[in-house]
Image: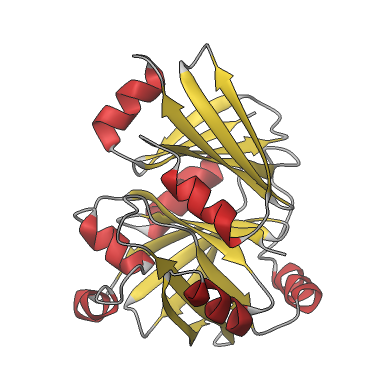
Amino acid sequence: MYKLDHIVHFVSSPEHAMEQLTQQGLHVVEGGQHEQWGTRNALCYFDSTYIELIGIYDHEKFREASRVPFSLHETYVKNYYEDGLTRVALSTTTIEEDAKKFQQMGFKVIGPEHFSRTRPDGSVVSWQLLYLGSDDLQLNLPFFIQWDQPEQQRLQELKSLGTIQNHPAGPIKIEEVSFVVSNFNTAHALLKLYNFKHTQMTNSKLKADVLKIHTPTGMLAFYCPIDEGDVWNMLRERGQSICSIVLAGAIESKVLHVENANYVFQ
């Protein structure tokens, strides 16, 4: 079973973005450095899912990492280093088998490969990543992550480190990652990978068809405009992309704009 693991939000300064989110009642901590990629991050956890605020400290290492097809680094470069919500990761416990299965389905597969991050206290956390894609998809598929620690052990460690704590803004969970799209090709490709529960409807207020893919830890919602309106305008301005993260359970409803990304508190 695949679950929403995290959303990658590229920012010019993780420290500045961390400060902005903290002021709005979210608990955010420094994550550490990916020495092999030349990046550093800050983390905002909602139990097992999280938002990764990631910035570059070594551009040469990052350019090398961006040469990997379908990687989150390549996506950021192809977006002309535009900050914002860039990619989504799904967690798995069968990454080797997944790679073989996806390749047999006709997708181009990169990995799995091992990576790690050094925390501020010097400890190291490690995982495997698997990228996949198809040349005919304009919007990237999620990538897959398998943590080296068992989930309950990893979450208990994150709680003991203070990485996972209650948010002052309320008992918040990630309810939805929202995409604006010109078609459902990427969503249909994702449904080909796994028989996710999904729902499709027309939202007359937004003037868009909506396809929602459900995982146990949050939805991926694809909004495709059928007439001029907010979704139409956003697609025209941003192209096919992640447009927002919907956070449910907030004490106060609001929309927060941080580093070219929308955080919708509900």
Residue 13 versus residue 59 in the image, above or below: above
Q: What residue is rendered at 30% in x and 56% in y? A: 12
Number of numbered discs on residues: 0
Residue 24 placement (x, y as % from top left)? 55, 38
The quarter of the picture where the N terminus appears is bottom right
Residue 26: % across, % down: 60, 46
Quarter of image, res 195? bottom right
Which residue is nearer to you in this view: 15 or 228? 228
Q: Quadrant of residue 219?
A: top right
Residue name at image x 68 percent, y 35 percent: 248
Q: Residue at x 65, y 26 (%)?
A: 252
Quarter containing the C terminus = top right
Q: Nearer the viewer, residue 99 or 261?
A: 99
Query: In the rendered image, which quarter is residue 258 located in?
Result: top left
Q: Eyeballing the image, is 185 above or below 253?
A: below
Q: Is residue 44 visible?
A: no
Q: Position of residue 216 (x, y in %)?
A: 74, 52
- The residue nearer to you, when weighing 179 against 50, is 179
Residue 232's spot in the image, x, y percent?
34, 22
